[in-house]
Every structure is written in structure tokens, then in C-alpha cells.
Amino acid sequence: MLRRIIHQYKRMLFGGTLLTLTLCFALYAMDQFDAGMVERLQTSEGLITIAILSFGFIALCTALLAAFAPRFLDAIEVLLISLALTALIVTVLERIMPPLMALIGPNLPKPRDLTHWGEVAGWAEWSILFACFCLVCRFSIGPCPGWMRSDAGPFRGRFTSPEPPEEAWKLLYPLPGQLDRYFYPESTVSAAPEGIGADFMLQRKGDFPHLVTVHDYMPGRQISMEAQFWDPDGKTALRTLGGTLFFKVSPGPDGGSEISWQETVRGAYPMLRLGLALSCIAREVNDGYAARANGRPDRSLLATGAPQMPPR
């Protein structure tokens, strides 16, 4: 668990920096309303205090989520980006409304009434925040245009197993009748739907089914698998996601095995690419593989929502 928290250092740095910049930007926007408070905060001591509090708050939230609710780690970026967009939009409105209202006519409400941090402005700001949050979520979990998608990776790693290559192979490939040894327990393998160019359908517990096509199949040595989410009804935004996974097994010292892997996520949307980068996902996946290959509890992000392998 400690390694899982440490691997979030990029998320802590990104979140702390973004929150600091957002707060400083908000101070710039507030200078016409409370000049005294802003003047005190805009000193070097005030800015250092804002940075320390921002980084400390983000580090604490990230550590707690990584330890107890890793599925919600992406919420940090979603909320911070929504706040940053809200601060930007409100600042722009505050700058363009006075000349715009003066141009339209003197009988309309005064610009200050529309942009002051009072009852009306607070309601408007919460509305803007909600709209920004919905927009960011739309590009986080909703379908995105093709031009916004690109591949993430490749991610690489290497780990060892105390078992010989013939046995370690069972961890990597979902062999029928030996699924109890596969990396993901309680998985099911079935034939691919008729007319679909895939070798089989794999469904891990708690996950969507994948269509799997196997390449470079050399039992006990190496395998390359191409997976695609199976969503014939188009009910999930993940239907265009896929990826390739390559394993290579070689004999290791003391009769064990050395296993290297490479994975690429195909068609990843922007927030997914950001989340993978901030999570140090290659290290997390490698820790998960290594733990399962050596019969230890998997405490990586790979284990989120996935059953643990029974101890051997």
C-alpha cells in the first residue's frame, strides 16, 4: 500500500501546482473587491503559504484515496481542472462585462452587480463550476471524438517468478481448464461471437468482456494478445478502447522464470491518458504482476476491483 501511495507523486505534484495556480489566479480576479486581503496574500509569504497549503491538501487527499479508495483517484484531476476552468471563465467575465454593459446601455443592471462575489455572483459561479465539471466528466467517462483519441504507452516492465517457464506460462495466458492459475481469478473464457474475428472472449470479474486475438503464440516462451472491449449495444463509452499486451518468458536463476511485458492502450481519451501518466501505471502494473506471480497479496492499482489469487 505504501508503494501505491508513493507512486502517486506525479499526481500530487500536478494537483498541488494546479491548485496553487488556480488560487493565485482567483486572487488576481478578486483584487477589485477586497484589496486589503489580496494585498496581504500577494506578498511572498502569502504566496508561499498558499503553495504549502495547496500541496499539503492535495498530498493528503491523494494518499487517502490511494490507500482506501483508489478507484476515485481520477476525481482529483476532474475537480481541479473544473475549478481551474471556473476561475478562468469567471475572471474573463469580470473583465469583459463592465465595457460590454456600458456599451449596451445604462439602464441595464450594473456590471458590479453581476460579477460581485455576492448572492447573485455566488449562484452564477456555482452554476459555472457545475457546467465545467460536467464538461470535464464528459471527456473523462463519455465518448470522445476520434480526433481526441490516441494511443497511451507503450508501458514496459519486468518481474520474476519462482516457478519454471512452463508453470509461469499459466499465469499469463487464460488456458481453458487452468483459469485458477491465471493472473485474474474468477475469469471466464468463451468462444467469440460468430462473425467476429477474434480467438476467444475473456471476461474478468467486475469488468466488461474483451474480444482477444492472439499473435506470436509460442507456448512457454512468448505471446502477444490484442484485446478490444465487447459492447455490441454501444452502452459504454469504453467500447472504442482496446490494447495490445506482450509477454516474454525466459528461464531465470534457480529454476525460476524472468518475465518481461509491454502494453499499449489504444484509443485512449485525454483524461485516461492523463490518469495513466499521473499514476505511474507501468510501475503499478509491474508490482501487481510480480505480487501475483510470487503468491503475495496484490496491493497495486491492478488489484482494484479484481479478486486476489489464492495463496499457493
Image (cartoon, helix red, strand yellow):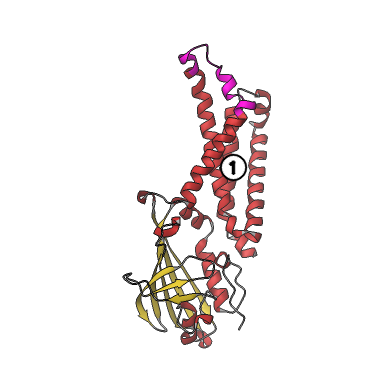
Magenta segment boundaries in residue numbering:
101-121
At horizontal 54% and vertical 30% (from top left) the residue drawn is 90
Q: Secondary structure at mark 1?
A: helix
Give how far across and how far down residue 244 sits, in percent.
39, 67
- Please determine whether, in this image, residue 311 is positioned above or below residue 283: below
Q: Amino acid at mark 1?
A: Leu
Residue 117 visible here: no
Q: Is residue 42 magenta?
A: no
Give how far across and how far down residue 291 sits, in percent.
58, 74
Tell whether 85 sits left or right of 39: left
- Please determine whether, in this image, residue 103 is positioned above or below residue 149: above
At horizontal 40% and vertical 84% (from top left) the residue drawn is 219
- Please determine whether, in this image, residue 38 is positioned above or below residue 240: above
Residue at numbered disc 1 = 19
At horizontal 38% and vertical 73% (from top left) the residue drawn is 192
**Considering the image in quadrants, where does the N terminus appear?**
bottom right
Q: Is residue 107 magenta?
A: yes
Tell whether 120 sits left or right of 266: right
**Considering the image in quadrants, where does the C terminus appear?**
bottom right
At horizontal 57% and vertical 24% (from top left) the residue drawn is 115
